[in-house]
Amino acid sequence: MPVSLNWYGRSQRMVQARFIGQWDVSDFITTYENTAALMQQVSHPVHVIYDFKESTATPRDLLAGFQFANRILPSNQGVVVYVSANAVIKAFVLMAKRMGLPAVEHIYNVDTQEDAYRIIIEKAHRVQNV
């Protein structure tokens, strides 16, 4: 699968997924399932960074992936940050937000990994009630 997924650090408070090369919505769904499984191992909020810096794909049906994510959304999902997402991915996120899908409520787009960490620190208080 063209996605690597792992805990960031020993505290298990952040998960990082790197999308590399070509991937499709089924890869996104599998990644989200695996991310949700990691989140279910702990009771505290877990923040997620999806890194698209090495991605060369733009799935046509990503909205279906967001709808799936909404059905299995872990109650302890924290801030989600997309790093280097292309314009199409950003447009799908915006559509999903306009549809009111809770799975995308706390998604933020940034250009760098450092900005992702900054956003998580700044916005984490908004999801601490999970």
Image (tube, rainbow, N blue to C red):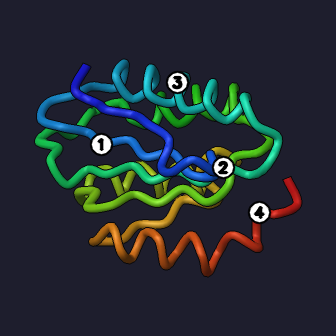
Residue 88 drawn above or below residue 5: below
On residue 34, the disc is 3
Q: CA distance from mark 3 to mark 2?
A: 13 Å
- Residue under numbered circle 4: 127
> Which residue is located at x 69 percent, y 26 percent?
72
Q: Dot 2, how many residues are within 10 Å of its Cα: few (below 14), some (14-19), or many (20+)?
A: many
Residue 46 disc label: 2
Gap between marks 1 and 2 measured at Cα: 17 Å
Q: Position of residue 114 (x, y in %)?
A: 36, 75
> Of the residues shown, which amino acid type is indicated by label 2?
Val
Which residue: 51% across, 45% down?
A: 15
Query: What kind of residue is marked 4?
Result: Val
**Res. 38 image quadrant:** top right
Please rate how many residues cluster around mark 1, counting C-alpha atoms within 10 Å: few if below 14, some from 14 to 19, many from 20: some
In the rendered structure, which amino acid carries the disc numbered 1? Arg
Q: Residue at x 51, y 30 (%)?
A: 32
CA distance for labels 2 and 4: 10 Å
- Seen in the image, is 118 located left or right of residue 126? left
Q: Secondary structure at mark 1?
A: strand
Q: Nearer the viewer, mark 2 or mark 4?
A: 2
Q: Secondary structure at mark 3?
A: helix
- Check whether the beta carbons of the residues at disc 1 and disc 4 lie within 8 A of each other: no
Q: Amino acid at mark 3?
A: Asn
2 or 4: tag closer to the N-terminus: 2
The disc placed on residue 18 is: 1
SS at mark 4?
helix
* Numbered disc 2: secondary structure: strand
Residue 99 appears anywhere in the view: no
Q: Are marks 3 and 1 in contact (CB under 8 Å)?
A: no
Marks 1 and 4, how far apart at CA: 23 Å
Q: Mark 1 vs mark 4: which is more N-terminal?
A: 1
Image height of 130 relative to 108, above or below:
above
